[in-house]
Image (cartoon, rainbow, N blue to C red):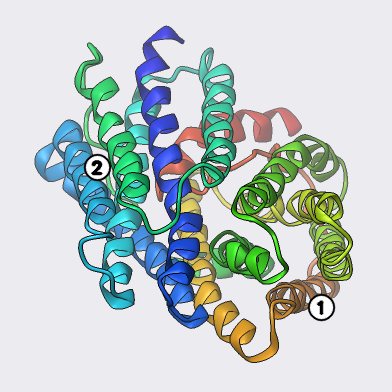
Amino acid sequence: MISFAALFLSVVLLQLSSGGVGPLDALSGLALGFTTAEVGLLGSAHFLGFFIGCWWAPRLMGTVGHSRAFAAFTATGAMGLLAHMMVVDPLAWAVMRVATGLCVAGSYTVIEAWLNARLTNETRGRAMGSYRIADMGAALAAQLLIGVLPPAAYLSYNLLALICIAALLPLTLSTLRPPETPTAPRLRPRLAITRSPLAAVGVVVAGLSGGAFRMIGPVYGQEVGLRTDQIALFLAAFVGGGALAQYPVGWLADRFDRRRVLIGLSVAAMATCGITVALSGAGTTAVFVSAVLFGAASYPVYSVSAAHAHDWAESHERVELSAALMFFFAVGATISPLLASGLIDRYGPDALFALIAASHAGLVIFGIARMWVRPAKGPRTRYVWTPRTSFIIGRLTKPSREADRSDSR
């Protein structure tokens, strides 16, 4: 486990940098006079870059190697951050956000390929647990950074760029030898649809709700009167609620029909959307509690959807299925910030949660329809809290899934 410390430290630094730039851009854009739609464009641009990075990173690793690819991606992200206050224009910032999204996906792809090559069946459980703690802990801390970083300031973007560059040090100074380059998974979106149409729709909804909230949430917070430090706590409450819900939701998903669990989560997400809107004027404590509840209801939707899809997959399909699910997540997350910002411009801040509630309502209807079409799966894979980081994440979870499948038989 000590040998993985360099990889986990790079994860923490990358998450601090990339997790902080989204809400900082939203607040900075509003401070500089950007429209809500232009702020939404920045969030959509990030996920466009994220998708490009997921697709391109395995191929770049095969050409130049792990270390050089990681250096290229982190340099791209740092340049995107540093250029923000040099060119203050929403379209230019959108290009910079494509660069930061590319950095996130590419860097995580390299780290996960490196991690997968070092894992054994004996260390996989502990390593993946530590990986999730490092990733989610840093994501939570990144939201809190917004409370101390002044919007539209050189200092803020320079600090995030320095953190991004610092992620280079653990890997470049590590004595770990780079592994062999993994084969790039084919991108076959149709595979997810044929194995589980409900899972494909579920990850789109997860991307839509998560992308809209994390990228447009600061706009909503400002519209309802939260200060910058309170907006940071509001976003952190969402991430924290999602993290706390993973284990109880996993327990339910392993014991009951996962379609029922998915429908229940969407119903809960719709309810928490209504609670959030109803409590928006009831004080900051009520707003924070509603954010925790919303995160707990909506955050696990991706992992439950992924587990349901893998129930119907063959062993040789798992890596490509994970890539297909990530593709659909990126589609939802790319569309939602721009769509949510346009609705807020037209109908006010409550439109953000109206959009999210509508998407979950669609998932409930589709889930019920699918239960009429196909019976529940018998032997199932174990629920895995799946990070949404790269197209090769399936390689990290594949062995444990196969072991659990064999045991269940």
Q: Is residue 371 left or right of residue 211?
A: right
Q: Between disc 2 and disc 1, whose residue precedes?
A: 2
Name the residue at 67% across, 50% down: 230
The x and y percentages for residue 145 are 51, 41
Q: Which amino acid, by three-letter code, is at mark 2? A: Thr
x, y (%) of residue 113? 34, 34
- Judging by the rendered image, the residue that carries numbered circle 1 is 365
Is any atom of residue 187 visible in this view?
no
Cα–Cα span, label 2 and label 1: 42 Å
Q: At x 46% / y 73%, what residue is drawn? A: 39
Which quadrant holds the C terminus?
Answer: top right
Q: Secondary structure at mark 1?
A: helix
Q: Which residue is at the front of the view, 243 or 37?
A: 37
Secondary structure state at the residue bearing disc 2 = helix
Position of residue 129 in the picture relative to residue 365 (left or right): left
Instruction: Specify whether residue 5 is in view.
Output: yes
Establish if 139 lies above or below 39: above
Give the image location of residue 332, x and y in percent. Answer: 54, 70
| Residue at image mark 2 | 74
Please identify the quarter of the rendering in which residue 171 is found: top left
Question: What residue is at 25 percent from the left and 55 percent from the top?
Answer: 80
